Amino acid sequence: MLGGNSFCTRSRIRERVPSSLTMTEESIIRIPPYHYIHVLDQNSNISRVVTGPKTYIRQDNERVLFHPVRMVMVPPRHYCVIQNPVSRDAGRNIEYDDVGQAKLRHGDQEIRLAQDPFPLYPGEELQLNITPLTVVLANTALHLKALLDFEDDNEKSVAGDEWLFEGPGTYIPRKEVEVVQTIQATVIRHNQAIRLRARKECQDREDRARVTGEEWLVKKVGAYLPGVYEEVVDIVDAFVLTDKKALHIRATKTFRDDKGNLRRTGEEWLVTMEDAEAYIPNVYEEVEGVVDITTLNSRQYCVILDPVGADGKPQLGQKKVVKGEKSFFLQPGESLESGIQDVYILSEEEGLVLRALQVLEEKDEDGNEVERKPGDRWMIRGPLEYVPPVEVEVVVRRDSIPLDENEGIYVRDIKTGKVRAVVGHTYMLTQDEELWEKELPLNVEALLASGKDPVADRSNRGSKPQEAQPRDKTRAVTYRVPNNAAVQVYDYREKKARVVFGPELVILGPDEQFTVLSLSGGTPKRSNVIKAICLLLGPDFCTDLINIETADHARLQIQLSYNWHFDIKDKADPLEASRIFSVPDFVGDACKAIASRIRGAVASVQFDDFHKNSNRIIARAVFGFDESVKIRSFFRFPQNNLVITSVDIQSVEPVDQRTRDALQKSVQLAIEITTNSQEATARHEAERLEQEAKGRLERQRITDQAEAERARKELLELEALRYERQGFSSVVF
């Protein structure tokens, strides 16, 4: 047993000391002060400690296990931990066994504080080297846990107990106590709190009993050091409330708040500035959000759905009207039906159509009590300010529709379905009326939108109508009939037609439609070219191109122009006026009838005869003869009183190429003969004029020579007279 202990001791020393301090064979060993060596007696296999200062002479049966080693020196405010310490008695003396070996407390530890230097006995180990003592500052604590049962200052601690060592102070470690962690105090500022949770049943700082898992808040400003069974869950900041913001709170568990009010799980409420300027939610309170204040001015109102009653409970399915000026917060569960709405301010030309949602008793405009049943409709007119109660729904806002003398609207009664036109005065729809849209055919829409009528405007004849622009279908359809024109309007309800002569403005009734004319156009005439509403009464003209064949089978193409007009004796007579619309395509029918007459007349004459007398033949064929066998001056269509007054032959061209060439050759010969005759006449006239000019020139030349001789004679006379005067003067001198 002793040998085993010595072997273990040597092994531990060999592991602890450096390799240079292994067993030595030196006989004399000098041990300095505060040093020591272990000496092994090989006879008894027991190791002992030899301390300095000393000169040790080794015996033959002894072995020095290592060179001198410095003793363990623990300075003030330090400590170390010794594993397997020696056993001491009450007087702190080392106990030895029967063979002189120091007794060890195997598996135990000993904490040694500041003391004189000491050696390590065989078997002792320095588990923790020299370490400064832990200084615990203010607002700091050590979380301690008992590993073994012990008793200190008459306080008995059981293994597993936990407590705090709070600063300021210096912690003296114990072998029975373990330092779990260092806890720092949490600083609680203004408008802050810390949220704590109990890990175990305990008493908090205010000596309140807390159960495991319970949470609470600490709001006291300053540093807070949580207890040993308390843990900091979170730091909660306060919500700063103003006059315009409130806090929406929901309870997550049934509890009583700081004011003693019982809050049940799921209950919601508001915290406003009247309750607290800065609010820290309780641990069982959940912040749903920040609610802004709702402000209404004097011209606004709102409808609150599911309002909170006087008992604080929401009245589900109810409504509440709030009128400004007012500021309030929407309580949890409340909502605005349509947001903030403006008060209905009605002028004299405005009104509101209302509908009752519930049974309502109110006063009408005359001040009489009236009971409204659900679904009833009525109308109020301005000037006034109106805020609809919860029992009333505003259907529509009505404005007066100003109408000139020539403007109108279509109004439909929603009860009877009757449609009528209102023309010429300002009108406001009643509660049982609505605007009615009048539909028109697409071609009529296009003609009305273009602003032009292909018949009334010559420049637009034969062209397609312009693209129709959007039309207000509730407005009365109007059309300005130009001068010397007519429009037919048919009433489908009365089954009557009326003709309006221009200049006039036509306003269609709800059941009236325009009669659209589909006329032939182009040259030669083609059907359904012109679409028109109004019909010109003339005088006007139309041009047509027809093919004829003479008796000698000469085929010709003639372009004719007809002048026409409608002869209406009494425009006030409806039957007489409607006759002009009895023929849908009067242009095409007239051209066909005239062409038929011309073909019949030309078929009985030769080409030469027709070429010389074409105008008379065509006029006779179209107009015919009267009782005195004279050509008439007009041709009347009795069906619609259309009168053809004249026929103009614009061109005659042969259809056959050979006939056209022969006619062209004869025309060229006639032109050539005429040209030669004119050239001969012009040449003879030129020669005559030339001879006359030559005679006048010869007479002028003779006259000029006589005048020259006369002037010369006078010159010579003057010169002779001058010589005579010069001779007389020389004789005198």
Image (spheres, helix red, strand yellow):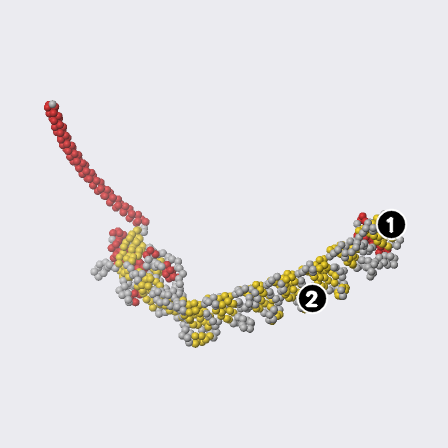
62 vs 509: above or below: above
In the image: residue 279, left or right of residue 451 = right
Q: Position of residue 317 (x, y in %)?
A: 52, 71
Could you say which is closer to the camera, residue 133 or residue 202? 133
Mark 2 crowdedness (10 Å alpha carbons): few <14, some 14-19, many ≥20: some
Examine the image and state in which quarter residue 3 appears. Answer: bottom right
Which residue is more in the foreground, 574 or 108?
108
At label 2, the amino acid type is: Lys
The answer to the question of whether label 2 and label 1 lie on touching residues, with beta carbons closer than 8 A, is no
In the image, residue 523 above or below residue 374: above
Quadrant of the image containing the C terminus = top left
Q: Total marks drawn?
A: 2
Name the residue at 82% across, 58% down. Answer: 86
Q: Secondary structure at mark 2?
A: loop
Q: Residues within 10 Å of mark 1 (few under 14, many from 20)?
A: some
Real-space Cα separation, disc 2 to disc 1, in angstroms: 63 Å
Residue at the image position 60 percent from the left and 65 percent from the top: 281
Q: Nearer the viewer, residue 711 or 505?
A: 711
Mark earlier in primary sequence (2, 1): 1
Q: Nearer the viewer, mark 2 or mark 1?
A: 1
Residue 221 in sight in this render: yes
* Placement of the N terminus among the 4 image quadrants: bottom right
Q: Position of residue 722 (x, y in %)?
A: 13, 27
**Where residue 453 sits in the image (x, y, percent)?**
34, 59
**Horizontal arrangement in the rendering, residue 396 relative to residue 140 (left or right):** left
Q: Nearer the viewer, residue 183 or 455?
A: 183
Which numbered marker is on residue 200?
2
Q: Which mark is residue 58?
A: 1
